[in-house]
Amino acid sequence: MQRALLLENVHPTSVPILEASGYEVDYRKGALDEDELISALDGVQLLGIRSKTEVTARVLSEASDLVAVGAFSIGTNQINLTAAAGRGIAVFNAPFSNTRSVVELAIAEIISLTRRMTERDRALHAGVWDKSAEGSHEVRGRTLGIVGYGNIGSQLSVLAENLGMSVIFYDTAEKLALGNARRAETLDELLETADVVTLHVDGRSGNAGLFGAKQFARMKQDAIFLNLCRGFVVDVDSLAEHITSGHLSGAAVDVFPQEPKKRGDSFESVLRGLPNVILTPHVGGSTEEAQEAIGQFVAKKLSDYVTTGSTMLSVNLPNLQLEHTGVGRIKLLHRNVPGVLATVNQIFADHGANIEGQMLATRGDIGYVVTDISDVTERGASKKLQALDTTIRLRIRDAFERPEFPRARRPADPPDVSDAQATRVA
């Protein structure tokens, strides 16, 4: 029985999908630290996490059975993608499933902060009737500045325009403007124009410290700031200073540089207690609808990978869309150097293989060749493929849908494929 480990209370809809693929699922609610994770991954082929569990290079080097990691979230910065690719471990995430949930939270917070609902709510809870229009505005006619015009930013753009807002956006990549949205040539242009600035950038290391004192100083007087993307992108001390000074009229923050590991843990931040500031515990995508969709999406991607070899939407391996063919399939992840495909096919020819189909994709230093074979006249091809200096991981599945035999070789290890492991195809 193959094993899957799911952490951080991922949606339970993922469990039956993996079980249907022949996996015994170990389901846990909390995150694990590095040592705990290494111990828990002994004999585990599939790992599912959210944002709190760090899958480091050390974890990956110790997890000799691991075949794939599913990030049940948009972000994958908690996973060392380069180390995973170097060991032939596929990583999948959910780039679209919680987009709507994040967008709706942003809209709700923009309206709440613009109307200063936080202060009215706090006053009534304190027993004070503070009926006033002071500092309260409509969002209609105001300008929304979106930093990062990807899946979330572009959908937010459409909804904001439907509320009567003007939209300006900034992105380092070329993006098609939706509706009447206008692209800013520079970040400074956006900051000097927008009444509301919201961040929706990805988790790449180059975005660390993207927004600090210089950027806050550029924002308009009484502007509003939102961060629903990554905690390390923003200097929260500088944000607090601009709130307390009165330069900014409000802020909403859903992600933080340091976050507690589990529900119920204490939370400390310089933003606590500041006026017209909404703090939420990294729940931008945490609606029941989004979590269910994420659970199904990522589990299906993991299932597709182990059953067909499909890597479509993998964030670290070459992408191939594959289906069941009813014949044997040999999947080889290899270093992307000239001559690999010719060598592989020569090995198949030497063993009398009848190749039904073959697909190749590359991504940087990694290549992925998948070969469907109906019959061979003698065994031994798998040992030769595994012995190649360019091989990262060899995976085989025969026409009878027997469980796969993932064969990963650490860079310094000699080939180790026993005859007992060889299937009919090899």
Image (cartoon, helix red, strand yellow):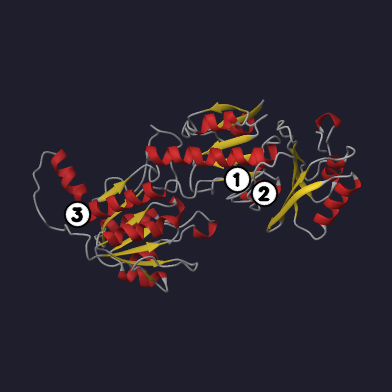
The residue pinned by badge 3 equals 115
Q: Are marks 1 and 2 in contact (CB under 8 Å)?
A: yes
Q: Within 10 Å of the Cα at label 3, are there few (<14), some (14-19), or many (20+) other Cα atoms?
A: some
Locate the C terminus and report the quarter of the image it occupies: top right
Label 1: state its secondary structure.
strand
Tell me the amino acid under the disc marked 3.
Arg
> Residue drawn at (61%, 49%), measured in percent from left and top?
81
How far, Cα to Cα, is label 3 from label 1?
42 Å
The residue pinned by badge 2 equals 85
The answer to whether residue 367 is seen in the rendering is no
Closer to the camera, 262 or 407? 407
Label 3: state its secondary structure.
loop
Give above or below for 276 relative to 195: above
Residue 313, percent from left and from top: 57, 50
Tell me the amino acid under the disc marked 2.
Ala
**Image quadrant where residue 401 sits:** top right
User: Nearer the N terminus, badge 3 or badge 2?
Assistant: 2
User: Nearer the N terminus, badge 3 or badge 1?
Assistant: 1
How far, Cα to Cα, is label 1 from label 2?
8 Å
The residue pinned by badge 1 equals 91
Closer to the camera, 233 or 213? 233
Label 2: state its secondary structure.
helix
